[in-house]
Image: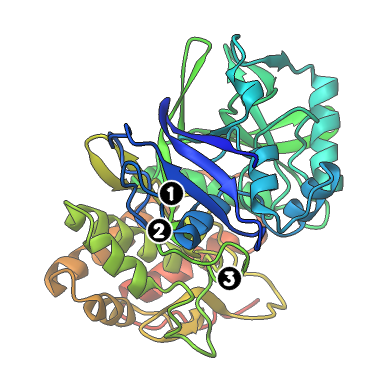
Amino acid sequence: MPELELFLHDQYVGTVRPVSRDRSRVMLDIDRDYRQQTLLSESFTALPGRAAVSNAVSNFLGGYVPEGNHRERMAAKRHVSKDDLFALLTEFGGSIAGAVTLRTPADARPGRPSYESLSEEVLTQRLEQALRDSDQGIPDDSRSTLPGYQPKLLVARFDGQWAYPHGRAHSTHILKPQVPSRPHRIFDEYYSHQLARSVGLSRYDSWIGEAGAMTYLAIQRFDRDVDGDDVRLHHQEDLAQALNLDWRDTDVKFQDPSWPSATTRASARRIGQLLAEIPGGDAVVEEWIRQLTYHVAIGNNDAHAKNVALMHQPSGTVLAQLYDALPNFFQEGLVSWNMALAVDGEFDHRRMSVDRLRAEIADWAVIRDSRAESLISHTLASVAEAIGAVQPPQQVSSGLIEQLEWNVSRLRAGDEIGERPRG
């Protein structure tokens, strides 16, 4: 039976093998000599010499593979089934989010990871490919991938130059090309990055770049560090993985408005209570409150469980920096005003208020009301200050700044956000 070797950083954990009766599932046999240095996952325990629970392992590892159209296109190009988890990990498990790597026998051959310098012409072609094919623009021999739906290109940057990772070589940056049907999107996201850095919710770098006729958003990966020509990994697990949500269903990362209490789906409450169980969880919960407040303030309808992550470190677990936070609730002709996760049982962004945030957090029963109120108030004040101080790109969507100012002023006044008058 085929096997993959699972490593966390460069520590051998055990072997992964397919489940013959269900190709969407895998088994993980933990090596008898494995001694945990960094937590592998919140969703299962890695006991030396034992087989971990297959469903939890599958949802954990499946959480690292591509989603939606990306998975379909990338699986088709490698001639494997989009539902065959072991095959997907074999093709793309060499460099995924965080510090887990799944290695094939070929990966054991001596030699350093291979990178290819990217000329502007080739970079342009790869960005066009990612946009056209929705396949993350990786070369045929790459074993890299990230979750998500947006067109993206995975690249490395050394000494100010772009390079292409081959085999299981690691990327250090994500490039998101400008989508013709949504030309303002990358500028809106870049502006949100600037706000989040000003507020103190993120630290990674980002900028708008050009390659030929292509415009792109470059994002430094917060789960990677570059030391000379070496790439060091930091272990990341998103909350869909930590909550053991089914990797095969791309909707479980959203709370279901028709069944909001479903344990098969994410919710702000489930996230808050899981974070509270982490050793030293008070600080992690507080950071989640700040991030949730920011999502409400900017109107991010995509703040689902895969866009919240944990960083597992030898010293303990912390909440990852804010990422993929886009202001969306300002667009004309919205199909839905619903948030990805309800606040105090309410999905409609227009009904959001500080009172709802406080009631939502109180329902978690993991932090003092006075402390939650202070965190919400301080975060909103910081967002208001950032909006006044950060110069937005000229290409942000029309009405975006006015909408953010409206959202924050309404929240700070104790009102529901409502709808901003047009004209």
Name the residue beneath numbered marker 2.
Answer: 242
Q: Is residue 400 above or below residue 183?
A: below
Please state the horizontal and vertical placement of residue 34, each as a whole percent of the image: 33, 34
Q: Amino acid at mark 2?
A: Ala
| Secondary structure beneath label 2 | helix
Residue 394: horizontal and vertical position, in percent? 65, 46
Q: Residue at x 20, y 70 (%)?
A: 373
On screen, residue 66 versus residue 210, left or right, reads left
Residue occupying the point 60% across, 9% down: 111
Cα distance, mark 1 to mark 3? Answer: 28 Å
* Residue beneath disc 3: 329
Inspect the image, locate mark 1, and give the three-letter code of the amino acid beneath it: Glu
Answer whether residue 85 is visible to the viewer in this image: yes
Q: Position of residue 139 (x, y in %)?
A: 78, 29
Residue situated in front as seen by the camera: 230 or 286: 230
Q: How packed is label 3: few (under 14 Cα within 10 Å), some, or many (20 or more)?
A: many
Within 10 Å of disc 1 (Cα), the crowding (few <14, some 14-19, many 20+) is: many
